[in-house]
Amino acid sequence: MSGLIALLDDVTAIAKVAAASVDDIAGAAAKAGSKAAGVVIDDAAVTPKYVHGFAASRELPIIGRIAFGSVRNKLVILLPAALLLSAFAPWVVTPLLMLGGLYLCFEGAEKVVHVAFPHRSHAIEGAHDPENPAQLEEEKVAGAIKTDFILSAEIMTIALAALPDGEVWVQAAALAMVAVGITALVYGSVALIVKMDDIGLHLAREARTGLMRRFGCALVRAMPRVMALLSAVGTAAMIWVGGSIVVHGLDVLGWGWPAGQIHDLALALGHAVPAGARGAVEWAVTAGLDGVIGLALGLAIMPLALGVVTPLWQRITTRK
């Protein structure tokens, strides 16, 4: 009997330790996920454009494929890579983050150029728009997963940096929780956004009250504007996040002049307004200047990216 009681005590102790570990993992994951919020907003705003132009029946399957690729990116590739780099080569993390930031700057700047010069955008789209819808879907999904890989790398690296020092398995579990939770949040939101017009159409046709039918019609009419707004927000977020990552990386590597100038200007302008609006003004100034730097960097590297990197990458992938 005493042996059974002792065994129950051991089981209780193990359960308490496990519960404490779960609490530690959940708390660490929540803290790490909040640090990556800016990139999450970017990811959610960018993704809907990849299902634009497809039949309604293909929207959710495409989102599902991108979400699966995102989880695979995070869990199979990025999580082990982040833990290995953090353990054996932590000095590599900041340069890799900056490379990802430069890619975001380039993506955002390219979209700005396409808006400013639409004839060039149409020419590019026409050159890469196959007649086969299945092939177009494959290209769109591949492009979305590629962009998601960069954003996921930023999310996982930022999340890892926000985690407190501890056992590797706790950090791995927290990062896995961040990866799955953020992916579910982002692509669940994206699925809801892209199906809003179908929901509105259903209400307009099937709702029992005139008020709900009018709401459905209004929803259908509003969605093109909402999608255009999301596209603009996604582009701005790309440029802002990319610029802020590069500025922060330069500060970490020892050249803190850009970050210092932005900080000082944000403080100065923040103190010029009432105290209640000071925080918002400082954030807006910082984000705006990071965005200006990001756009400048994106435009500067665009010739290299389009003239050298992209053809080289296409040649490599075509051979494969």
Image: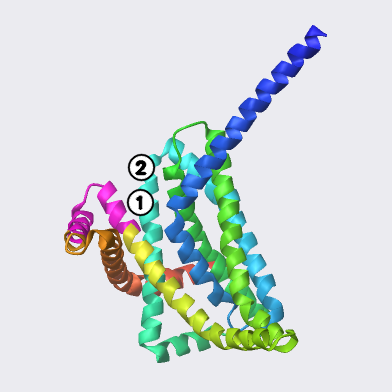
Tell me the CA gap for discs 2 and 1: 8 Å
Q: Is residue 217 left or right of residue 168?
A: right
Front-lying residue, 123 or 187: 187
Residue displayed at 75% across by 15% down: 7
Overall secondary structure of the magenta section: helix
- Say how the picture is coloured: rainbow
Q: Which disc number belongs to residue 91?
A: 2
Q: Position of residue 180 (x, y in %)?
A: 60, 52
Q: Do labels 2 and 1 touch, CB within 8 Å?
A: yes
Write the start and end of the magenta stretch as one range: 245-267
Comparing 23 with 111, the one in front is 23
The residue drawn where x is 69% and y is 77% is: 58
Quickly name the residue at label 1: 95
Disc 1 residue type (three-letter): Pro
Quarter of the N terminus within the rendering: top right
Where residue 217 appears, as percent x and y from the top left, is 62, 88
Which x, y percent locates residue 107?
Answer: 41, 71
Which quadrant, please, contains the C terminus? bottom right
